[in-house]
Image (tube, coloured by chain):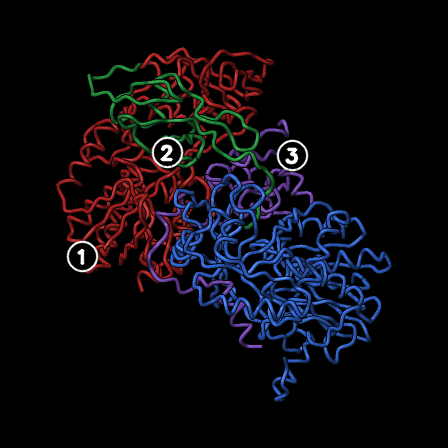
Amino acid sequence: MSRQYDVVVIGSGVVGSSIAYHLSERKTKKVAVIDKGFILTGTSGSTQAWVWVHNKTPSWYGELSMYSAELYPTLKKRIGDVEYKRTGGIAPFFDEKDREHALRLAEMQEKVGIDVKVLTREELLEKEPFLSEKAAGATYSDIDGNVNPFRLVELYTKAAKKNGVDFSFYNPVTEIRRDKGYYQIRTEKEGVFTAKQIVLAGGVWTGELGRMLDITIPVKQVRGQILVTEPLEPFIQTTIAGVRQAENGEVLIGYSKEEVGYNRQTTLDVMQETAGMALDYFPVLAEANVVRCFSGVRVIPKDGLPILGQIPGMENAYVAVTHSGVTLSPLIGTLMTELVMDRETSLDLSKMSLSRFERSAAGELIV
Amino acid sequence: MVSVQPQAYVSFSFNGTEMRALKGQTIAAALLANGIRKLGVSRKLRQPRGIFCHTGRCCSCFVTVDGIDHVLSCMKRIEEGMKIEPGTSDPVVWRSGDGD
Amino acid sequence: METDVLIVGGGPAGLTAACRLAEGGAKVVLVDEGFELGGHMHHQSAVVRSLPDSYETMTGTEFIEQLIGRVNALEIRQLLSHSVVGVYQNGDLGVTDGNRTFPISAGQVILATGAAEDAALFPGWTFPGVMTLGAAQLLINRERVRPGNTALIVGLNQFTLEVADLFSKENVSIAGIIEERDRSAVPEEWIARIHEERIPVYFSSRIQAVLGNGEVEKAIIQTSGGEKVMEADMICISNGMSPITDLAELLTCELTYNESLGGQVPIYNEGFETTVPSVFVIGNAAGVTCAGGLLLTAEIAANQVLKNLSLRTREEYLTRNQSLWEELRKTENQHSGIVHEERAGIINESVQENAYG
Amino acid sequence: MDKSVIVCKCEEVNIDEIETALKTGARHFDDVKRLTRCGMGPCQSKLCGGLVRRVISEYRNVSISEVEPPKKRMPISMIRLKALATDKEATKVISVFKESVSGVSRS
């Protein structure tokens, strides 16, 4: 027996669950979400969860992130308290020579409306008194912040369920076929789901979903390892790229990148390097206990930029896959809903089309 | 007190009160020998905590030793002159945290 | 640091393996997070019941002291108060002394991490005065502190009997033993022994509440005959043990669930080698067993490690392996809750091929 | 049993909270952990691992072996940052600033 839906979203991570929630707000279509695991078993449950804008490049990507960050304050009223904090974001540099680069970044971002300040050491230490005096300065913007990713995905899901979305967990998709204008999605545990429209939002596994439709979605897996300390008295005010203090006092530290496929092991090598980095930033952390280390596998499209929109040549099939899913989720949910429901979007998505990779392969220059 | 052969004693303080314990005892045992069972409080509900497993695993016996927080009192021996404070140093911020 | 064999855990199993390996000519490093060797057995003032025939009758403490004597006489690098933090990418183990973390590179790794006592759920189990029975035993025998004046013990088993003796010797009175199971599910021999000591046992009972000003002063128990308020300043949990497998898991050893071996336990072959080549698991970490079982699993693994290091011929290895397994079977059938087939049940055939092929 | 009984001692998560998470479709220890924080405290589920699994298995009416145990994480026990830190040159850890700078020079 087949289950009939208007839209099936594959993937219940921060991107998939946001899309499902935003679709469900229209209350016109029957929506289902299918996931091979449970909410938060993938990347969305293993992230630093910065809502990060100010040094995203190229500028249009920064601009996109800014629009998304602007949607966060209203999210609380719509789905509940996701513990979003607009703390301001700092990316410190330790070499005075880097100031020149910082100024160039600020100039570039200003053109799209992102206010980036380049801080002197004194200004930096005034904002973050416990930061190492070795820091030479930093780029800073008010727009950045962080969120609790667990609450975020949980509350997107809860709100979507309330609006009638069906969730099917622990149910891997094994096959997707197109038949008489409908998509037949075969699953391991619950048979076939039939849908008029499908959205691939499988995060790090989206490439595999694409293969089921014979299309190439070029994403790579990049592992990040993060150390977590015991809860400490609040001492970090802003969101610092690489080190942030959560609401409960835990400090999350790390910014590592390794391409090791889906391997989510942590390694003592990177943990030690990360601990070293933490002390470079905040010498006061020396006596803090590290309680755990976790790793997440980020999905990074081949060119690092979001892949968003209709799948070229495939009617009613859409893809939404990006790094920075946490930052971009409110905007992606909004835009994808517009696309799926209204067939047009309030922002031009053409730069993010999957077709750019074909064009690029054909030698066309893309920026 | 359990019957023992005479041994050396060490002096230490707990919450400012001078105490004495057998040399070689863990901090947890030294405190227990002085009638102290409440070693600290839990993080969220601030309920008292004490020795549970005494093998370094359960993490219920945290104390502050010479200013260093969250020392497992069952895994460290008492030393002459140690200043022990109860394990009450967790910040009073409590929300669900982040990260897997 | 480099070594032929790294042994994690200095309890009876780890010490036995260390002795055998060092005697056999291997370079051994022994790491233990405690500040003395011996593990739980070090604080067992009771006679060890299940030692193989070659041993004379002695208490756990005496046994361990002898074993430590043997270890100290050998050239074994001992790292006490050192804990294994985790694993490096190349498979080396990371060890810390609390001041720095460094790698140990070992051709063969033996996990002798022991077992941990299980907790039990009842309202108030988190309060001071509630502790594991093992903690109470250790406090008396090693720390020389009486953990309380009047104890309620949750759970009636072999270990309860052993510590009940100790309590009576040290003038800790026992208000009662609370056992969830029905009387018929408990061996008559245990009940008889408890009756001799005049300790009340409440079958089909559980703790309903722990009362006191932030620490144990009284408990309300729910018995088949209704509620009963009992005065006690200590509640000791004797709820069995589970193998400690943290490091085995980090080393990506495959685990399986086996109730009679104590829960999650690594899969191993007939040399106690896990699914990760050259990583062995022995003692309670390989399934909670009796004292004799601890030593024999260690002997069996040491035998194979010596073969792996070419310090023992294949023939010597085979003969010894066979006789050790025979002895293990005999000892465990007699003294531990392990139905011996359970061990055979988790022995992975693919691992066997790997080891013998 | 009283649903307010604490199961995870470090994070003080009770039976009721665990069952609420299970109602949303959580099946295994780590699913519940991400929703409730059980097992996320200093002992890293060493103490509550078995207890939580039992609560889950009773609620789901499956044997304990069908409830995945918590994924073990490093460090095996808590460690001070200074003891973990190394002088070894960082190769995998990068600076966000440097990364954005390379974006600036690219465009």
Residue A318, x across and y down, in percent: 73, 71
In the rendered image, what is the letter of the chain coloured blue? A
Disc 3 residue type (three-letter): Asp
* Residue corresponding to mark 3: D16
Residue C312 has which mark?
A: 1
Label 3 neighbour load within 10 Å: few <14, some 14-19, many 20+: some
Q: Is residue A347 left or right of residue A271?
A: right
For the residues beneath circles 2 and 3, the answer to whether they share a chain is: no
In the rendered image, what is the letter of the chain coloured purple? D
Q: Distance from label 1 to label 2 (Cα)? A: 37 Å
In the rendered image, what is the letter of the chain coloured green? B
Q: Is residue D48 left or right of residue C247?
A: right
- Which secondary structure, mark 3? helix
Disc 2 residue type (three-letter): Thr
Q: Residue A276 falls in which quadrant of the image? A: bottom left
- Which secondary structure, mark 1? loop
* Residue corresponding to mark 2: B55
Q: Read off the chain for label 3.
A: D
Judged from this view, the residue extending furthest toward the right is A28
